[in-house]
Image (cartoon, helix red, strand yellow):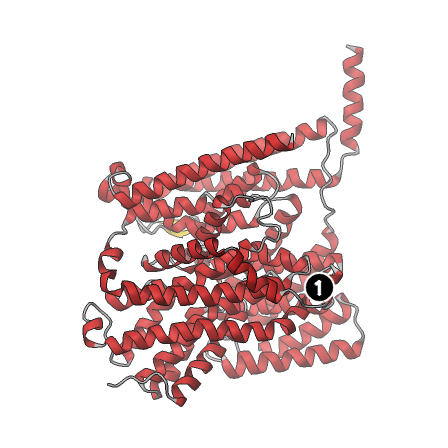
């Protein structure tokens, strides 16, 4: 009994110190599991022919993800943590924010204005390049987009 | 109507078409369909001969243009270059961009020549060949392609299957092709059309990779060898070294091209999978194996010749590109159909010549530019990343002028980033997405039209089924043997 208590406490400590990357993978798998469950529930409302294959796929996906989560939890329990690459969540969030702003700007503003502004700001603040390099690159890309997308492909692009 | 192939202006229009095709191939998101659609109005003022040379020249050059960005930037220029990314980009990362480009250009040129020759030879018997494929064969073809998931699963088979099923599920979004029911739209109008391949590809590969490189702060090619672009000759020789693979891939590409409605992205993936399954040494696939560049590139261009067959003989387009080409032909008073070979044999052979010339010239031009293009890979990523981001997002928007496409590209960019970091195969997801629609619709259509027996009472369907089983068994035996040797 004592041995069991010691063992549990030791393992629990290990979990306390688990590699955050492994936890991230479990969270990623959990998101896929929720996705599969949501799709399975949604498919129940469809025509039997239309839902057949998606429903089967959802069930198989859920089973596979649960197995994957179990394997990962087991590896934590046995203290066999794989060396997964580090994820820079803050920088990821920052880059995604840049891209969200770019998409929103493209939706509401003429892209010939958005492109040089995006390039200048991204290079100067995110890329930390010299001001003159950022300006040259922004103007160069503006010229490229003007020639290729405006002059050549102007029938399908946003104005 | 008289058709002249070898006059000065015809050659100029052909070269112009090739250049435009290469540019469209290079631009992420834009492909053959957009290229031909935008060129068609330009051809109003041209003679039918010049118009055809311009259009076919462009159509033949797009696949190679797309392979350049696939190899150098992990950004498939078109959906037809999906599989080229899998080994082309790892080669670039190892400093072998020149070799990959050399192999891609040679395989493309020879594949195009192969497709054009086969087209010329089988036009007289093309009718029966096209009629031999029906729903069960489509289903088996899709299943054959899906079997590649087990091979492209990078670290874990389980994760590979999860990715592949995710791809199949994304393919289920939108209207069901059989019943017409709307699935998984969640009251979002954009999802009525389903999840489109182009934004997914750009997100999973181009955006995800650029985010990763930006975080690492490294250029694309980290090896010092990449600062000198060498190995183009070696890449060219590798096609002849693996001539059997090239030949098999070209045959498969042509056959898939012949089947109406299957499309270039399917040919690319299926042929890549077949190349991996039948390779003696398959461990290096997905990590920068030259064979992984040769097979899809040969199939891509060979497919163009095949796709022209149903277009010209029946007036049934082999794919979206061919549908646009068909429209352009009719615009110029040329009616494709069974009588075309009898009434307009000169047009048919003009098209074959244009395809042949386009494949060769696009690859030669591409090869000449390769040493300069490959230098992109050693440029600082802080300059490359915003270019890839903007081209991917604006390029995907350009296809349908929908903001939703950019949002999907971004969502899949983030998904691709996590998949890469946690060892989930992005290629498996793409295989599922590309083949999902064909797999599901062909299954239901077979059941409705022929019942379960339909899968097993047609010779080509049975042949493909046996091939799938043989490949799976062979893969398992090999996997066990390799494991045994390693232990």
Residue shown at 79% from the left, 22% from the top: A9
Residue B482: quarter of image: top right
Residue B396 visible: no
Chain letter belonging to callout 1: B
Tell me if residue B159 comes above or below residue B199 in the rendering: above
In the displayed structure image, the side of residue A76 where residue B481 appears, left or right = left
Specify the quadrant that holds the C terminus of chain B: top right
Seen in the picture, residue B233 relative to B195 is either above or below; the reply is below
Q: In this picture, is B197 found above or below B423?
A: below
Q: Residue at x 23, y 44 (%)?
A: B449
| Element carrying mark 1 | helix
B455 or A15: which is nearer to us?
B455
Residue B423, x across and y down, in percent: 63, 44
> Percent x, y for residue A144?
61, 80
Where is residue B373 drawn, in percent x and y?
Answer: 63, 71
Q: Residue at x 42, y 66 (%)?
A: B112
Q: Position of residue B147 (x, y in %)?
A: 45, 42
The residue located at (37%, 50%) in the rendering is B438
Residue annotated with mark 1: B226
């Amino acid at each position: 009994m004592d041995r069991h208590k010691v063992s549990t406490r030791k393992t629990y400590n290990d979990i306390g110190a688990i590699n955050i990357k492994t936890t991230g993978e479990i969270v990623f798998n959990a998101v896929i599991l929720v996705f599969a469950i949501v799709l399975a529930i949604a498919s129940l409302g469809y025509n039997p022919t239309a839902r057949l294959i998606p429903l089967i796929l959802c069930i198989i996906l859920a089973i596979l993800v649960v197995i994957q989560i179990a394997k990962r939890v087991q590896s934590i329990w046995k203290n066999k943590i794989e060396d997964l690459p580090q994820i820079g969540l803050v920088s990821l969030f920052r880059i995604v924010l840049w891209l969200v702003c770019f998409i929103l700007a493209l939706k509401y503003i003429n892209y010939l204005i958005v492109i040089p502004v995006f390039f200048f700001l991204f290079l100067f603040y995110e890329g930390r390049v010299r001001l003159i390099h950022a300006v040259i690159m922004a103007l160069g890309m503006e010229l490229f987009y003007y020639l290729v997308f405006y002059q050549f492909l102007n029938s399908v692009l946003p104005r | 109507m008289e058709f002249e192939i070898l006059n000065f202006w015809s050659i100029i229009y052909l070269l112009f078409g090739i250049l435009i095709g290469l540019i469209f191939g290079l631009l992420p998101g834009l492909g053959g369909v957009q290229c031909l659609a935008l060129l068609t109005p330009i051809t109003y003022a041209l003679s039918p001969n010049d118009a055809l040379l311009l259009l076919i020249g462009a159509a033949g050059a797009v696949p190679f243009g797309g392979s350049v960005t696939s190899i150098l930037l992990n950004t498939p220029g078109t959906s037809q270059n999906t599989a080229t990314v899998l080994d082309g980009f790892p080669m670039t990362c190892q400093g072998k961009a020149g070799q990959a480009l050399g192999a891609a250009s040679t395989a493309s040129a020879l594949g195009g020549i192969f497709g054009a020759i086969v087209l010329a030879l089988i036009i007289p018997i093309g009718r029966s060949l096209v009629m031999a494929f029906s729903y069960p064969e489509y289903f088996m073809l899709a299943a054959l392609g899906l079997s590649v998931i087990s091979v492209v699963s990078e670290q874990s088979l389980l994760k590979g299957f999860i990715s592949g099923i995710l791809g199949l599920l994304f393919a289920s979004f939108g209207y069901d092709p059989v019943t017409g029911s709307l699935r998984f739209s969640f009251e979002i109008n954009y999802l009525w059309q389903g999840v489109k391949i182009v934004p997914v590809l750009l997100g999973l590969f181009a955006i995800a990779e650029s985010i990763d490189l930006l975080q690492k702060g490294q250029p694309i090619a980290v090896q010092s060898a990449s600062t000198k672009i060498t190995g183009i000759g070696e890449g060219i020789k590798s096609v002849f070294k693996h001539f059997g693979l090239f030949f098999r891939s070209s045959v498969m590409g042509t056959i898939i091209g012949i089947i109406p409605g299957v499309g270039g992205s399917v040919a690319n993936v299926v042929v890549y999978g077949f190349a991996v399954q039948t390779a003696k040494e398959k461990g290096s696939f997905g990590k920068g194996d030259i064979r992984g560049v040769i097979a899809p590139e040969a199939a891509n261009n060979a497919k163009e010749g095949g796709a022209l067959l149903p277009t010209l003989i029946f007036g049934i387009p082999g794919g979206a590109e061919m549908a646009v080409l068909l429209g352009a032909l009719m615009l110029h008073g040329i009616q494709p159909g069974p009588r075309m070979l009898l009434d307009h044999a000169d047009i048919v052979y003009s098209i074959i010549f244009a395809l042949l010339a386009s494949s060769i010239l696009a690859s030669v031009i591409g090869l000449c530019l390769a040493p300069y293009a490959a230098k992109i890979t050693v440029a600082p990523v802080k300059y490359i990343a915003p270019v890839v981001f903007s081209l991917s997002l604006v390029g995907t928007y350009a296809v349908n002028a929908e903001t939703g496409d950019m949002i999907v590209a971004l969502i899949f960019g983030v998904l691709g980033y996590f998949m890469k970091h946690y060892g989930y195969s992005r290629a498996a997801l793409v295989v599922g997405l590309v083949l999902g629609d064909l797999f599901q619709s062909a299954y239901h259509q077979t059941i409705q039209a022929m019942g379960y027996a339909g899968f097993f009472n047609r010779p080509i369907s049975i042949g493909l089924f046996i091939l799938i089983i043989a490949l799976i068994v062979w893969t398992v035996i090999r996997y066990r043997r390799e494991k045994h040797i390693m232990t």
